[in-house]
Amino acid sequence: MSSESAWGPFGLLMCCFPQKESSKPSSPQYRSDRYNAHVRSNLNLPTQRPKPQQPQPLLLASSSTQQQQQQVKDTDKPGPPGTPSAAAPPRLKPSKRLPAPVAVASDPRTRWASTYLTSPQLGELFDALHATLKHIPYAICGLSALVDHGLRARRAATVSILCPAHCKDNVKSWARARGFDTWADSVGVPIGGESGGGGEIRRVRIKYVDQGFERLERVRAVSGAQGERAEGNAWVLGLSSELDHVAAAWLDVRKRATTTTTTNSSSTSDTDAKTSKAMKSIAHDIFWVLGRAIETRHALDAHFLPTFLGEEFWTAFGEANPETRTEAARAGVDVAAVLARHRADASLREHDAMLEAYGLRGDPVTTQPGPLEDMRCLAEKKSMYTLGNRDSQLLPGGSMALLPNSEPAAETETATGRKDGPKTVKHVNVKKSSSVRSSSSKGKNKRDLKRSKSERK
């Protein structure tokens, strides 16, 4: 059907002169619809497009969902006593499966020896450790270090090494690179046999301090294949730092016992007995170190004794062991200077308390803890001193017995890296024992009494 028949005799004029349409907004959609309308009219197509299907309102979908949820709730409700309960809807299986369990390697600690170390085994173990860690700052500490210094009243089954916090992971990595077993905070070092390949595997625990490692006294070990205190021997803590280490261990046991008693008032007698036994054992080691320093004429530098000479330990340990001041003075400790510093700190604290009572603030006395008071293992737990039966053994005679033979003083390394030769303690009478001193004092008292009686007559 042509446009002329559709519009009559004026169809041609209508096509040439189209009528003006009402003004509409000039938008792209409007122009597109107008162009398509002209094309449909030229092609004799229907002028109106089919209306698009209206989308379903959201209300219907939500209502259907509500109906389904209501049906599920109705099925969950129990029916009358005689009707069977409706089955629960099946659960959908998760699209992601859990990963398969990873096979855990066997515990290497089952191959580690647990017997007590002999002197040759201790020297071989020290040499193996130094060959692995000689480029890392470290020091052997604890009971094995005391045994190396000459302690014969106790024996050790394991060895502990101490390093700065930034080297704690390197120690384990270098041990693993050498083929040693690693587990938690320990490594297994093989000793015995040719090239260390056979024999036994010994446990070595890794411990670290966050700060202050450079302020510790380190000396060359006596045990070693190259001889006593040789340059190629392993590093151990010196007597001064070992004394501070054992003092920190005694203080830690006392603090834990006090905390346990405060939090749990119903503490058993077994716990108190264990705490008392541990503190006595550590006290014996403290007096052994003091006696060893006297016998070897090793100077106990106050720079290496922040915990031992601190007011908290000195006061508590001195009250429990009255002979502490005498033995410390014999070992070369300036007891008068220590007590004067403690009295000055106490007076400053008293002055600050008086100022606080009037609303003023003074200069509080801050005491920094020693570096060994926060010793930790790789499990981020405090690990101060070995007292377990499986790691140490107390031999007959106690740990206060001194060895008759004396060893030469060790070469020490200070914080600046400077090596100092042997030091001697002046005005120390080592040969005079306590029994001789007591007998001489008794004789002197008798002579004084006789003299006073004669003067009265």
Image (cartoon, rainbow, N blue to C red):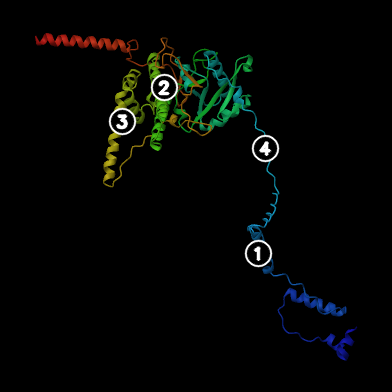
User: Where is residue 140 drawn, in percent x and y?
Assistant: 50, 23
Find out whether the residues at labels 4 and 3 contact each other: C-beta distance under 8 Å.
Answer: no
Identify the secondary structure beneath mark 2.
helix
Q: How far apart in space, not on screen, are marks 2 and 4 (Cα)?
A: 46 Å
Identify the secondary structure beneath mark 4.
loop
Identify the secondary structure beneath mark 3.
helix
Q: Looking at the figure, which quarter contains the N terminus?
A: bottom right
Q: Amino acid at mark 3?
A: His
Q: Nearer the viewer, mark 1 or mark 3?
A: 1
Q: How far apart in space, not on screen, are marks 2 and 3 (Cα)?
A: 27 Å
User: Where is residue 411 drawn, in percent x and y?
Assistant: 46, 18
Of labels 4 and 3, earlier in sequence is: 4
> Residue 78's image quarter?
bottom right
Q: How far apart in space, not on screen, are marks 2 and 1 (Cα)?
A: 75 Å
Residue 281's label in the rendered image is 2
Question: Which residue is label 4 attached to?
Answer: 101
Question: Which residue is label 1 attached to?
Answer: 66
Of labels 2 and 4, earlier in sequence is: 4
Q: Amino acid at mark 4?
A: Pro
Q: Amino acid at mark 1?
A: Gln
User: Where is residue 341 drawn, in percent x and y?
Assistant: 31, 30
Relative to residue 92, is residue 450 drawn left or right? Answer: left
